[in-house]
Amino acid sequence: MRLPWVIAHRGASAAAPENTMAAFRRAVEMGAECIETDLHLSRDGRLIIVHDATLNRTTSGDGLVKNYTFNELRELDAGSWFSKEFAGEKMPAIEELLDLAGQADLSLYLEIKGGAGYGVERAVISALRGRKESKAAVVLCFDASVLDRIHQLDRLLMTGLLFESGGEDMVKEAVRVGARQIGPRGDCVNPELVGDAHRRGLKVVTWTINEPAQMRVLAAIGVDGIMTNHPNRLIAVRDTLPPK
């Protein structure tokens, strides 16, 4: 049986505030091999790690991320919403996560969010250029045109095409845009999809799986990686599976 990669979704986001260094470090402590995170652009064109286009849910700020400068965003509290223990956590810069990835030998899944801002593709490539961590980074997006632009700028950067719903064209579309991975939602994965993807040289990573029973089913189907808010659960499940 293929043992799936443990991909910490927004870090260990069940144990610490999502998309903060606290969540990323907690994922490392739990034994995750990969971290998935989300990227937006600040008003002054800097990459900032946050999931939503707005600040209200996970920070002390209000309004759109793109309306604030990088320094203004860094002043916000991104931890208190989760618990008092994490009061004062900052929205990370991508460089902080890259440094952690280098230290902990992590692979990174960097999702460019819809509406992240004009020029976000160039900003991502610029952030990765010259970094050894780029060799183990995958740029994700639901929008195939974003991955097209990534490949126009850097043919070597690995990409993955995300899918919200199923369909027979997932593999075909990923191949068309030069993606090396597909990222279907967990309930869209079946043995036929995984087999087709593998025959076309694509890896399959799926999201966001938090229940051990579903983790076991997906591992049996042969997915290459599972994104989860509970990397410790997936590690415990994986430890019970027979080796490849």
Image (cartoon, helix red, strand yellow):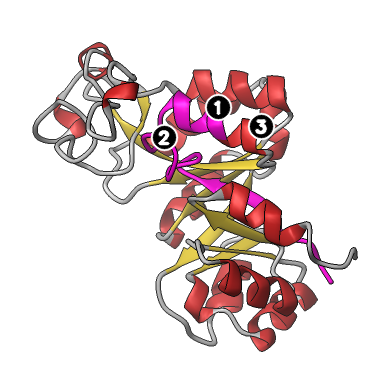
Residue 64 image offset from top left, x and y in percent: 14, 36
- Choose mark 3 or mark 2, whichever is in front: 2
Q: Is residue 61 above or below residue 192?
A: above
Residue 157 image offset from top left, x and y in percent: 64, 42
Which residue is identified by label 2? Answer: 16
Q: Are marks 3 and 1 in contact (CB under 8 Å)?
A: no
- Of the numbered discs 3 and 2, the one sitting upstream in the chain is 2
- Of the numbered discs 1 and 2, the one sitting upstream in the chain is 2
Q: CA distance from mark 3 to mark 2?
A: 26 Å
Please tell me the numbered disc located at residue 25.
1
Using a 10 Å C-alpha cutoff, classify the residue at mark 3 as few (fewer than 14 neighbours), some (14 to 19) or many (20 or more).
many
Which residue is identified by label 3? Answer: 134
- Of the numbered discs 3 and 1, the one sitting upstream in the chain is 1
Q: Nearer the viewer, residue 244 or 26?
A: 26
Q: Is residue 7 visible?
A: no
Q: CA distance from mark 1 to mark 2?
A: 9 Å
* Residue 89 image-quadrant placement: top left
Mark 3 secondary-structure assignment: helix
Image side of residue 55 versus residue 122, left or right: left
Mark 2 secondary-structure assignment: loop
Residue 9 image offset from top left, x and y in percent: 49, 48
Q: Which residues are magenta?
A: 1-26
| The C terminus sits in image quarter | bottom right
Image side of residue 230 versus residue 131, left or right: left
Q: Nearer the viewer, residue 227 or 177?
A: 227
Residue 12 image offset from top left, x and y in percent: 50, 41
Q: Is residue 213 visible?
A: yes
| The N terminus sits in image quarter | bottom right
Q: Is residue 139 above or below residue 104?
A: below
Q: Amino acid at mark 1?
A: Arg
